[in-house]
Image (spheres, helix red, strand yellow):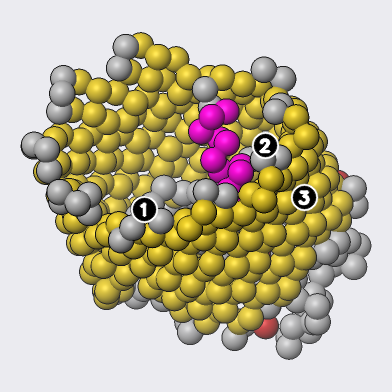
Amino acid sequence: MLVRFRYPTPTMALAATAAAFASVCAHAQSRSAEEEEEHFYLSEQYTYDDNLFRRATTASPDGTPALDPTLSRDDQINRITAGIANDFHFGRQTLRATGRVQDVRFRENDHLDHTAGRAHLGLDWRMLASWSGTLSATYNRTLADFAHLRTTARDLIQSATYSGSARYKLGPRWSVSAHGQRIETEHSLDERTIDDIEANYGRFGIDYVTPTEHTFGLEYRHARAKFPNFIAIDPTQRSPEYEESAALARLVYTATVHTRFSATFGYVERDHLSGSEGDYSGNTWRAQIDWHPREKFSTVLDAWHEIKAYTDAESDYFVADGVSLTPKWSPRRWLWLGLEVSYEEQDYIAPSTLAELTPGREDEVLSALATITYSPRDNLDLELQYSFGDRNSNRDSRRYDAQVAGLAIRWRVL
């Protein structure tokens, strides 16, 4: 991945934590699998952000200024990245190792300068004819998204994820699977350590593949999350520690070689262990149409109604209703174009440790990302990105719009 913008993309509560809003076109996604085999790369990225701290353009009703006048609202960011990836094959087993280090420098707000990085080690294993699975460990260090902060100070998030899965084939059509995951996230900023999280996730499922290659599955998920550094800042405030259970049905229907439909429908219950405030129960669903009419063109249409939370503000969760469209096109072998447009309505369930203490927050988030990737040589990529984000909220302090433009050069040395 060449460019990473700090737009706030939410993650599902039962899924692994993910990086902040970052997406690339089809070329970057499809090539990543090839590059993981063995490569070392260097990249230089220049980004201009016209609203770095994700602040409203006007002062809040209480007279609080939109931004400290000693800070610059816009900034130019330079990222130098060195990365490596390699696959090691041992018979039917494959060990995958990837890592990257980024030196990030801000021209105006240099108090945000930092070193970021990511390391991943994963094993794809197979045993006999029926058993397969994965084992993995991932470490990530990145700057928190200012859309979720009440401060302009630097907050580095360090997260460690450990996971394992196993699948057993009961026959040519049936299979059962299990997955477990442990996530630990820490904030470097003292006032944000109350949102440090330790979470355990588990999943069990059974799948059936029809003779025409359609798939139907049933799944049960369970999660428990605690916030070890939580301190109530209001006498009425309860701990955000919770347990969550979900029962889901999945369907993948391949209409033609060019069109595939997939859908997930389920029921979720989240219970907070210190009381009923913030509890939620209800249906969730996601539907997707993947259309690939030509070899060089594809598009994905997504719609969802899910419980979500931002990676760096897990205690502040919401019900999300959204839709996204992601067309991708490669008119030439050396040119790739990508566009991602999404709209989401966010209904926050209860006040959190970091957000407002009054309930009823509702946001609308519109975002768009356009990507052009040019590869004059097999080992050289030039990528240009432009992204736009607009958040409307019934909280004045949460409203903002931002534009980000970036140019990156990536050279695969090996």
Reading the image, the residue beneath label 2 is: 116
Residue 307's mark?
none
The correct choice, above or below, for 358 with respect to 404 in the image is below
Q: Mark 1 against mark 3, which lies toward the viewer?
A: 1
The residue closer to the viewer here, 240 or 139, is 139
| Helix, strand or loop status at disc 3 | strand
**Which x, y percent locates residue 18?**
50, 49
Residue 240 shows in this picture:
no
Is-magenta flag for residue 124?
Answer: no
Instruction: Give residue 63's quadrant in the image.
Output: bottom right
Task: Residue 180: name its quadrant.
Answer: top left
Camera-side residue: 253 or 263?
A: 253
Kind of residue at disc 3: Leu
Image quarter hosting the C terminus: top right
- Predominant secondary structure in magenta? helix
Q: Residue at x 30, y 52 (%)?
A: 224
Q: Name the residue under label 1.
A: 257
Q: How crowded is mark 1: few (under 14 residues within 10 Å), some or many (20 or more)?
A: few
Residue 152 location, x and y as percent?
Answer: 75, 59
> Going from the N terminus, do you reach mark 2 or mark 3 first?
2
Q: Residue visible at 33% across and 58% down?
A: 256
Residue mark closest to the camera, 2 vs 3: 3
Magenta-tinted stretch? 23-35
| Mark 2 or mark 1: whose residue is earlier in sequence | 2
Measuring 41% from the left and 27% from the top, which residue is drawn there? Answer: 122
Q: Residue furthest top?
A: 90
Q: If you read the primary sequence from the N terminus, does the residue marked by circle 1 or circle 3 appear first?
A: 1
Pinpoint residue 310: horizontal percent, then vertical percent: 51, 60
Q: Is residue 371 visible?
A: yes
- Which residue has dot 3 on it? 384
Residue at 75% x, 68% y: name it.
Answer: 402
